[in-house]
Image: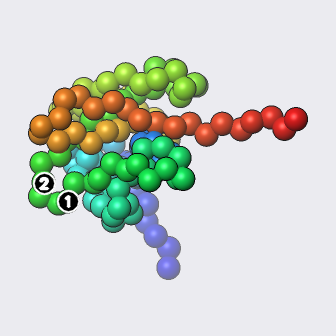
Amino acid sequence: MAVDIPNDGISLRFKYGPQTVFLFVDCDASFDSISAQLLEVLRERYPRGLLKGQPSSPDTTPVPPAGEDCIVVYGLPRNPRDLRAGWKALNADGENPTTLRLKQNSVLAFALQTADEPSPEFRVEIPAFEDED
């Protein structure tokens, strides 16, 4: 059976630590609804929390359960061609992918912020391929 995929959406890549979450979102959806969708996926996919670093490290960031106050904060790459250049905070209040001019497969860093926490930092690990000797 064929699946109908609407033409009014784009795929976005959300990065935290070594994880990348691909979401297909409506171009006119608010970032509040995108955040709710992202949190739902994170709760299902990462019930033990998001890795902060290498998979060999047990250090994780817990994903808040449904109903708990949590704000998803987003960052854009300083240089879209070099994600190692860092991230700049994105004010997504009242915005959507169209108003922010996001394109297919745009990359966004995200952080989870609870009410008692100051602005979180964007923890993103970019894979590196080392040359063989």
Image location (x, y in percent) of residue 54: 53, 46
**What secondary structure is found at the residue carrying circle 1?**
loop
Asked if disc 1 and disc 2 are in contact, CB closer than 8 Å, the reply is yes
Which of 66 and 9 lies nearest the eye of the viewer? 66
User: Does 74 sit above or below residue 35?
Assistant: above
Disc 1 packing (10 Å; few <14; some 14–19; many ≥20): few
Q: Residue at x 17, y 60 (%)?
A: 66
Q: Is residue 14 left or right of residue 129?
A: left
For disc 2, the marked residue is: 68
Q: Residue at x 28, y 32 (%)?
A: 120
For disc 1, the marked residue is: 65
Which of 83 and 30 lies nearest the eye of the viewer? 83
Which of 116 and 24 lies nearest the eye of the viewer? 116
Q: Is residue 127 left or right of residue 112?
A: right
Q: Amino acid at mark 1?
A: Pro
**What secondary structure is found at the residue carrying circle 2?**
loop
Can residue 67 be seen from the camera position used here? yes
Q: Residue at x 88, y 35 (%)?
A: 133
Scheme by which the image is coloured: rainbow
Q: Label 1 vs label 2: CA separation?
A: 6 Å
Image location (x, y in percent) of residue 86: 46, 23
Image location (x, y in percent) of residue 1: 50, 79
Image location (x, y in percent) of residue 82: 57, 25
Disc 2 packing (10 Å; few <14; some 14–19; many ≥20): few
- Hey, which residue is sitting farthest bottom in the picture? 1
Can residue 11 be seen from the camera position used here? no
Q: Amino acid at mark 2?
A: Glu
